Amino acid sequence: MKNIIFLAPPAAGKGTISSALSEKYGYIHVSTGNLLRNVKEKNLASRISSLLKTGNLLPNEIIYEILDNYIKEIKDKPFILDGFPRSIEQVKHLNELINDLKLPECVVIYLDIDYEKAMTRALGRMICPQCGRNYNKFIETTKPKVAYKCDICKIDLVTRSDDTEETFKIRYNEYLKETYKVVEYYKEKGLLYTIKSVDDLQSMIDKIIKIVEV
Ligand SMILES: [Zn+2]
């Protein structure tokens, strides 16, 4: 299994697909968003949370330190990078990290979705505070079996504090401005595979598995 760099506009379904890939195929889901939200050190954690709440991007030094340490720990397993790289500067950092750690080649998967659909999804997104599983009340295939309850833990689901219409717009525009260049970069390198975001989770998983199987 090749490592995956997962690129997509916010709310395209990266989280759901990544969870499925880690459950069924042993991938480690490296979500920079989750890594940053779970920082234990108090001062850093409160700085990060206030930046995230306003929809701003975090300074690279913070992201690099947390991400690099984590990748070093898990580098012998296949992993999915979700939420990174978001700029050409971050691409360069990642290339260096891959070199330094002698990591195997990555494939880049771009999940394509239009704005309206992404917005609807962002507003329907819910997460289990206990197991981290993702749900969406607007998508048949990822709806919880009982409304607002985790299928596994049977406890109340929560929405993320940054899933509001306003924050979504900011994040989507940030994405257009910065991440689009990353998509173009990998396209030019011939490393990019585009997959259309659809509600049928399994069909997207099947396509990705074909790409990452060596
Ligand atoms: Zn749960």
Image (spheres, rainbow, N blue to C red):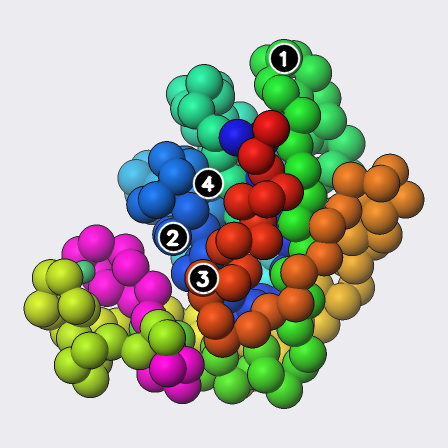
Crowd band around label 4 with a 10 angstrom C-alpha radius: few (<14), some (14–19), many (20+): many
Q: Amino acid at mark 2?
A: Ala
Task: Choose the circle earlier in sequence order: 4 or 1.
Answer: 4
Measure the C-alpha gap from mark 1 to mark 3.
32 Å
In terms of depth relative to the viewer, which is nearer, 100 or 110?
A: 110
Measure the C-alpha gap from mark 4 to mark 3.
21 Å
Q: Which residues are magenta?
A: 127-140
Marks 4,3: beta carbons within 8 A: no
Q: In terms of image quadrants, where is residue 29?
A: top left
Which residue was labeled with disc 4? 30
Nearer the observer, disc 4 or disc 3? 3
User: Which residue is depicted at the point 85% across and 40% down?
Assistant: 190
Q: Amino acid at mark 3?
A: Gln
Numbered label attached to residue 202: 3
Marks 1,2: beta carbons within 8 A: no
Q: Residue furthest left?
A: 154
In terms of depth relative to the viewer, which is nearer, 56 or 156?
A: 156
Measure the C-alpha gap from mark 1 to mark 2.
27 Å
